[in-house]
Image (tube, rainbow, N blue to C red):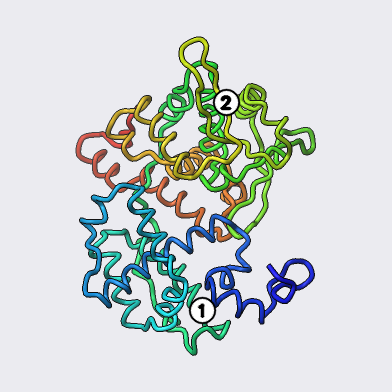
């Protein structure tokens, strides 16, 4: 990047932003978004909007059924293709109007079947980027201003929480001393025992691990680059230390990712596992969690287990064990305490439900928890 585009310290100048935005609008719009995960998410969300807008112009909006039949590689290729012509992408973003956005919102809900939360998350990215385009003088107005999201039930989430026995079974599922099993035991421990987001896990670097006040800790960079410390309990640190030592992660330096892909070279006893020096993706983390859930849990439970389900389990188990909402809020990196309170309300509703009182009145039952 030339000097005229950048101030001292790496900040993009206003003139630099204009020039850079002419080639790649997101490079300028996202200049202040420090999280690489956020940049990728915004780029993907806008790619869906661009595909929709082009479909509206050509009379062929991709139906949800067709999208679901595509492989992951084919979907990724379509989303990348949406950004292939930067000038065309910027034109569409400059010309999109309120009617286009409400149509896109309905398309996400009705054609793709996204939940209200899924629609609102994608629309939040669109609103944010269009606001920045307006403020950066890429367009004269912001058609997303005041555009409301879909109404949600703040106390309900389709995400399930595991019982303690199910959690223990999942943690014990990866067996053996080969690198994949060691890595996955440590990975599952951090997700379930510390409630990390998948993106926080993949962003963890060797230099983030250390000690504070005599405790093993990990420095976690959460949403908005907010930093917090995660205390690593004994079993978590043991699993993590075993992986780090076997994989030689500390020899790779403080900036090396803690969790990386591993691959076996050679066959049989002559084969050996080696690490690839790049971080796992969040998609890879989801596949690993799903694999061990299917191995350790009943099918009706395993099919609904993903990284966020382990985060949900962390919150509910901590609250059930007596942790305060404030402590759980800090551990999970929630900026708004109301986010944490949703876990508590959902837990209390199931633990002490009106149906229990009717059951006791009719037949002396109630509080029938699965063991």
Looking at the rendered structure, the secondary structure element under dot 2 is: strand
Residue at the image point whose x is 26% and y is 75% from the top: 56
The one nearer the camera, 214 or 26, is: 26
Q: Position of residue 308 (x, y in %)?
A: 45, 45
Q: Which mark is residue 274?
A: 2
Residue at the image point whose x is 22% and y is 62% from the top: 63
Q: Position of residue 257 (x, y in %)?
A: 63, 39
Q: Is residue 273 above or below residue 228?
A: above
Q: Identify the residue at the far bottom of this view.
A: 140
The one nearer the camera, 285 or 305, is: 285
Q: CA distance from mark 1 to mark 2?
A: 46 Å
- Name the quadrant of the N terminus: bottom right
Looking at the rendered structure, the secondary structure element under dot 1 is: helix
Q: Position of residue 193 (x, y in %)?
A: 55, 35
Location of mark 1 (residue)? 131
Q: Position of residue 310 (x, y in %)?
A: 46, 39
Q: Is residue 238 above or below residue 307?
A: above
Judge depth for marks 1 and 2 and give the one in front.
Answer: 2
Residue 244 shown left or right of residue 81 in the figure: right
Residue at the image point whose x is 66% and y is 41% from the top: 205
Residue at the image point whose x is 54% and y is 59% from the top: 38
Q: Quadrant of residue 3?
A: bottom right
Instruction: Looking at the image, tell me whether mark 1 or mark 2 is earlier in sequence order.
Output: 1
Q: Quadrant of residue 4?
A: bottom right
Q: Quadrant of residue 80?
A: bottom left
């Amino acid at each position: 990047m030339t000097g005229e585009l950048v101030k001292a310290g790496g900040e993009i100048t206003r003139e630099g932003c204009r020039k850079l935005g002419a080639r790649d609008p997101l490079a300028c719009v996202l200049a202040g978004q420090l999280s690489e995960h956020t940049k990728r998410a915004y780029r993907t969300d806008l790619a869906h909007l661009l595909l929709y807008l082009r479909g509206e112009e050509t009379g062929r909006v991709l139906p949800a059924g067709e999208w679901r039949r595509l492989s992951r590689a084919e979907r990724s290729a379509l989303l990348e293709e949406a950004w292939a012509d930067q000038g065309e992408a910027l034109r569409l973003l400059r010309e999109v109007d309120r009617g286009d956005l409400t149509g896109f919102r309905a398309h996400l809900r009705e054609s793709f079947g996204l939940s209200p939360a899924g629609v609102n998350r994608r629309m939040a990215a669109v609103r944010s980027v269009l606001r920045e385009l307006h403020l950066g003088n890429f367009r004269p107005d912001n058609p997303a201003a005041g555009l409301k999201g879909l109404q949600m039930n703040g106390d309900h989430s389709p995400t399930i929480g595991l019982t303690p026995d199910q959690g223990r079974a999942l943690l014990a599922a990866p067996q053996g001393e080969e690198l994949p099993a060691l890595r996955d035991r440590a990975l599952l421990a951090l997700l379930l025992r510390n409630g990390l987001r998948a993106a926080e896990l993949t962003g963890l670097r060797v230099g983030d691990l250390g000690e504070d006040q005599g405790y093993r800790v990990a420095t976690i960079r959460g949403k908005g680059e907010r930093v917090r410390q995660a205390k690593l309990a004994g079993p978590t640190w043991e699993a993590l230390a075993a992986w780090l030592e076997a994989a030689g992660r500390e020899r790779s330096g403080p900036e090396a990712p803690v969790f990386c892909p591993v691959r076996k070279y050679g066959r049989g006893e002559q084969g050996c596992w080696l690490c690839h020096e790049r971080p796992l993706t969040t998609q890879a983390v989801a596949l690993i969690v799903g694999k061990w859930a299917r191995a350790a849990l009943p099918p009706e439970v395993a099919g609904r287990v993903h990284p966020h389900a382990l985060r949900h389990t962390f919150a509910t188990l901590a609250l059930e064990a007596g942790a305060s909402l404030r402590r759980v809020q800090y551990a999970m990196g929630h900026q708004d305490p109301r986010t944490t309170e949703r876990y508590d309300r959902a837990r209390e509703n199931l633990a002490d439900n009106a149906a229990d009182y009717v059951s006791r009145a009719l037949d002396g039952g109630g509080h029938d928890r699965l063991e």
